[in-house]
Structure formats: C-alpha cells, structure tokens
Image: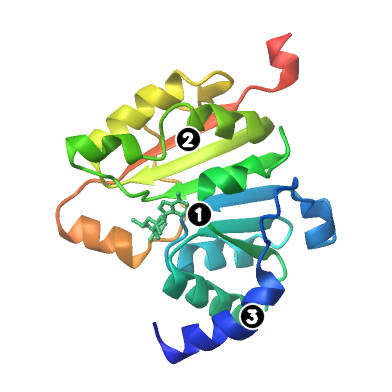
Amino acid sequence: MTNGQQKALATLLPIYSISLSGQIIDFEKIFGNANPLVVEIGFGMGVATAIIAESNPGVNYTGIEVHTPGIGRLLMEIERRGLKNVRIIVGDAVEAFNAVKTESIYGIHLFFPDPWPKKRHRKRRIIQKPFTNMLASKLQGGGYLYMVTDWAEYADTALVELSATEGLENAYERFAPPQIWRPKTKFEERALADGRQIKELFFVKASCTELF
Ligand SMILES: C[S@@+](CC[C@H](N)C(=O)[O-])C[C@H]1O[C@@H](n2cnc3c(N)ncnc32)[C@H](O)[C@@H]1O
C-alpha cells in the first residue's frame, strides 16, 4: 500500500464509506438525493469506477470491495476528481446486498470478477445461484446487470446462470457487444496482452408492467 493510499484510508474512509449495521441502507439520505443508484461489486483499484462516476454526475455509485490498497486508491480518486456521487462499502458483496432494499437499484457492475479457475474452487464464484437471485431481486424494473470477464469458461457459465435467473432477461442474444462507455483498466489491458478475449454480459430486469 502506498503512503497516499494509507493516508486516504485514515482520513477519507470515514467520510465516504457506508458501514453495514444490519439495517437496510438509506442511500437517498447518504447521497442527499434520489438519483439512480449503481452498485459495483469488487472495484479493484477503482479507476473505472471513478471515471464512470465523473462522467455521470446524475447517477450515484456505490462500490463494494475488500482489498484495502484499492479502497485507498478510490478514495484518492474521489478527492482528486471532487466526486460527490461515490460511496464505498468495505466488506463482502453478499453481506452488502443483504442491506440493499428490494427493487431499488438501477444498475449492477461486475468487472472482471475473480474467475476461480480451478474446478474445486468454482463454488466461490460470485455469479451463481442463489446470489444471482438476490441481485435480480434488488434491481428495479428496467434496471441492468453488466458483467465483464476475461475468463471464457466463466463467461459461459455466467451466461447460463444469469439466463436462468428469474426476473432477468438478456439484452442481447448471447454476449453483449463492448459497452463503449466502460473505461479499460490495467487489468483488462493485461488480459488482452496475455491473449485472453473479453466477454461482456448485459442483462435487464423485466419491468413489472411486462410481468402482468
Ligand atoms: C480480479 S479483481 C478485478 C478488479 C476490478 N473490477 C478491475 O476490473 O480491475 C476482483 C476484485 O473483486 C474483489 N472481490 C472479490 N470477491 C468479493 C466480494 N465477495 N465482495 C467484494 N469484493 C470482492 C477482489 O478484492 C478484487 O479486488
């Protein structure tokens, strides 16, 4: 961890973090507005998070992460860019989503989740049931879940899992075309340099009117 990241954690985390207290999080109160909310799972160093948030000041972003150097880095970006629309939850995504109100989120971002390539570790992958059911339940009608991975086999299983998740519909036939608004991170550049293909999945929550 750099000195800057360490300092950011000490001074900025109390300002920009949302603590999990076992209660449902009141995002409107925290952000001071009722703007749409996008939640990102595992933002890593948070560079993409900060760029996307800066480009969309009318959307609120909350990133969930456990990796402290990355949390420090995103805090530094929030300050440097003067972002008013970013908050951080330090902790596990499953626990964090438990504290999110049903049908309240506009978008879920999941960029390069840990692929857990070994067969015996695949049960640790975040995109599988019952967690996908929980994610779908937290999206509002018309909301979206956007996942990007450089692990082809994970992309295939995620496609199956998300397609079989009640309430979610694939916005494309199979994989999505690259969403041009998503900035490329070092992680993605390394994957491309290593010859891995990037696969994108974009699912939407059916709106209530479509269900009835
Ligand atoms: C492979 S990295 C990708 C980071 C970033 N999204 C990017 O594109 O560069 C996956 C990240 O997800 C985080 N992560 C994994 N499981 C998590 C969980 N259950 N809750 C929150 N973060 C998690 C890890 O700490 C790690 O930073």
Q: Nearer the viewer, residue 1 or 171?
A: 1
Residue type at mark 2?
A: Phe
Residue type at mark 1?
A: Trp
Answer left or right for 87 relative to 5.
Answer: right
Q: Residues within 10 Å of mark 3 (few under 14, many from 20)?
A: some
Q: Which mark is residue 63?
A: none
Secondary structure of the residue carrying numbered label 2: strand
Residue type at mark 3?
A: Leu
Which residue is tagged 3?
A: 12
Disc number lying in front (2 or 1): 2
Which residue is tagged 2?
A: 202
Quadrant of the rendered structure where residue 160 is?
top left
Quadrant of the rendered structure where residue 52 is?
bottom right
Answer left or right for 34 relative to 106.
Answer: right
Q: Of all residues shown, which one is farthest toward the left? A: 195
Which residue is tagged 1?
A: 181
How far across and how far down the image is residue 100, in percent? 69, 43
Q: Is mark 2 within 8 Å of ligand 1?
A: no
Which quadrant would the C terminus be assigned to in this image? top right
Disc 2 from disc 3: Cα separation: 33 Å
Disc 2 from disc 1: Cα separation: 13 Å
Q: Of all residues shown, which one is farthest toward the bottom? A: 3
Q: Nearer the viewer, residue 121 or 202?
A: 121
